[in-house]
Image (cartoon, coloured by chain):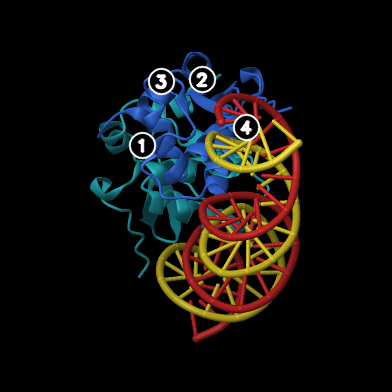
Chain colours: A cyan, B blue, C red, D yellow
Amino acid sequence: MGDYPSPDMAEVELVDVLKALGDPVRLQIVHKLADGEPKPKTLDGWGLDLTKSTMSHHFRTLREAGLTRTIVHGRTHAIQLRRDELDDKFPGLIAAVLAER
Amino acid sequence: MGDYPSPDMAEVELVDVLKALGDPVRLQIVHKLADGEPKPKTLDGWGLDLTKSTMSHHFRTLREAGLTRTIVHGRTHAIQLRRDELDDKFPGLIAAVLAER
DNA sequence: GTGACAGTTCGATGGTTGTCGAACTATTTG
DNA sequence: CAAATAGTTCGACAACCATCGAACTGTCAC
């Protein structure tokens, strides 16, 4: 029984979102999720040279901070940015974070 | 010889800005600086019950992350949000962080 | 059922960070 | 100069965090 609860957006605190984003690995993951499509956690293109367990830790951190949701599909998991909800709660934040420089 | 260098905005990294903002104390300080006016570090209204040395640590963290500058005036210091430069480098970010909810 | 595959969880480890008090530096005022 | 004021720096401490490997859970394929 894997269930991977994301917090209600009403309970999500800005400071926790910022803390989750304030790590280079997680910021890069969020960038890859920018288009809003769910991405398999096994994605080859994360561009990160980390072990499975470390990746799992970062996925959990992002989910618990309210940034992502996990979609279970058999034995594979996908991760998706909660873009609409985040935009509603923190207008402009994700756009600013994802903007190129 | 107190001089309190802020980094060039060209060298400021988004991830470091986000990490600096991902702390409740510093986020609150930044909120108090939202109007752009320099505020004395001794401000009574920070709303924080912390020692001088702890406040000094947070002021330093904000400055080194590129969020603020320090203005020395005799034996008193003021701190100011680098609003224009931040808006130029990270459009919309500060506005999103400072927005009420 | 057996094995392969996708992920999580656990324990350990080393590095970072928030906090404090004490000592220090620098500036103003008497 | 001496004392008071504003702030930094240092050392210590505990809590947290990123990382890893190993063990575990759950699902699919044969």
Q: Earlier in the sequence, mark 2 or mark 4?
A: 4
Q: Which residue is mark 3?
A: B92
Residue B20: % across, % down: 53, 38
Which of label 2 and label 3 is nearer to you? 2
Q: CA distance from mark 2 to mark 4?
A: 12 Å
Q: CA distance from mark 1 to mark 4?
A: 23 Å
Q: State the SS at label 1.
A: helix
Relative to residue A47, is residue B35 depicted above or below? Answer: above
Relative to residue A64, is residue B21 depicted above or below? Answer: above
Residue C1 horizontal side relative to residue B48, left or right? right
Does label 4 lie on the same chain as label 2? yes
Q: Amino acid at mark 3?
A: Gly
Is there any visible trace of residue A23 in the rendered image?
Answer: no
Instruction: Give the chain letter at badge 4.
Output: B
Q: Tell me the residue at 53%/17% (across/down).
A: B89
Tell me, for residue B64, which label it has, or none: 4
Q: Which residue is mark 2?
A: B82
Does label 4 lie on the same chain as label 3? yes
Residue B72 horizontal side relative to residue A6, left or right? right
Residue A65: % across, % down: 39, 49
Which of label 3 and label 4 is nearer to you? 4
